[in-house]
Amino acid sequence: MSPRPSSRLSLCAAAIGALAIAAFAAAPSRAAEEAVIIPAPAADVTPAGGVQTAVLAGGCFWGVQGVFQHTAGVVNAVSGYAGGSKATADYNLVSMGTTGHAEAVEVKYDPQKISYGKILQIFFSVVHDPTQLNRQGPDTGTQYRSAIFTTSDEQKKVAEAYIAQLNAAKVYKKPIVTKIGPLEAFYPAEAYHQDYLTLHPNQPYIAFNDIPKVNNLKKIFSENYIEKPTLVSASKVTN
């Protein structure tokens, strides 16, 4: 089980401290999980009118949210929980790894500006390592699993086809372990988890594990990158 926000900071500060921050400053492109340049999906969801939703899990939601908040076409990205019940959608409970929940991010996007397929490409490339089973970087447990929670049959087909495409192309050294399943419900996380990367950029955990992901988004997907993040605190989109 990974530490909670306060202890996660103290543990990382003790283990990494000033040396890690100095190393990060010297090599800003380095991430705990290196980005992989991958092909775009051969199939994509048919563009629809209005804001659409993608729900993705790929380790600690701070970094997943942070990347998509810097992605053009995303109108809101909310950290939360998916895969379990409403009664257990609580960080202290989810952190025990027994609730069925994954730390997830609900990405609301404008399909006229970014496609579902492009969101998946960013997810598999710079957000996380989809070959790690029930862990991501320093975090371990089923709550940190790689998962796609689909909101339609078309999303399911596109996600399944893309994983098959990437595995066939052998873009990773190991097979993708990302689980695909229908979204039953999404529960927003506590307020202190929202916009965490933007509010705490110098926290050792964020600086070492998550800021490099945003840097890789800017480097690999420059046409999809926006400098000013789309924050939950400033969004008019409600859940």
Image (cartoon, rainbow, N blue to C red):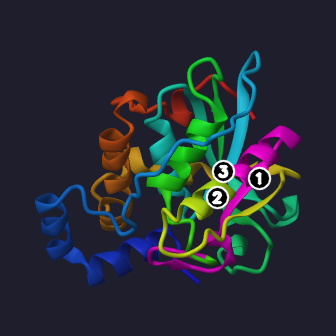
- Label 1, label 3: how many angstroms apart (C-alpha)? 15 Å
Instruction: Say which amino acid is labelled 2.
Output: Ala
Residue range corresponding to the magenta coloring: 135-163
Categorize mark 3 by other alpha carbons within 10 Å: few (<14), some (14-19), many (20+).
many
Categorize mark 2 by other alpha carbons within 10 Å: few (<14), some (14-19), many (20+).
many
The one nearer the camera, 18 or 221, is 221
Which element carries disc 2, helix, strand or loop? strand
The image's mark for residue 162 is 3
Q: Horizontally, is 20 left or right of 51 in the view? A: left
User: Residue 43's x, y, as percent?
Assistant: 69, 38
The image's mark for residue 149 is 1
View extreme (front): residue: 168
One can see residue 104 in this view: no
Q: Quadrant of the C terminus?
A: top right
The one nearer the camera, 206 or 190, is 206
- Label 2, label 3: how many angstroms apart (C-alpha)? 16 Å
Residue at mark 2: 57
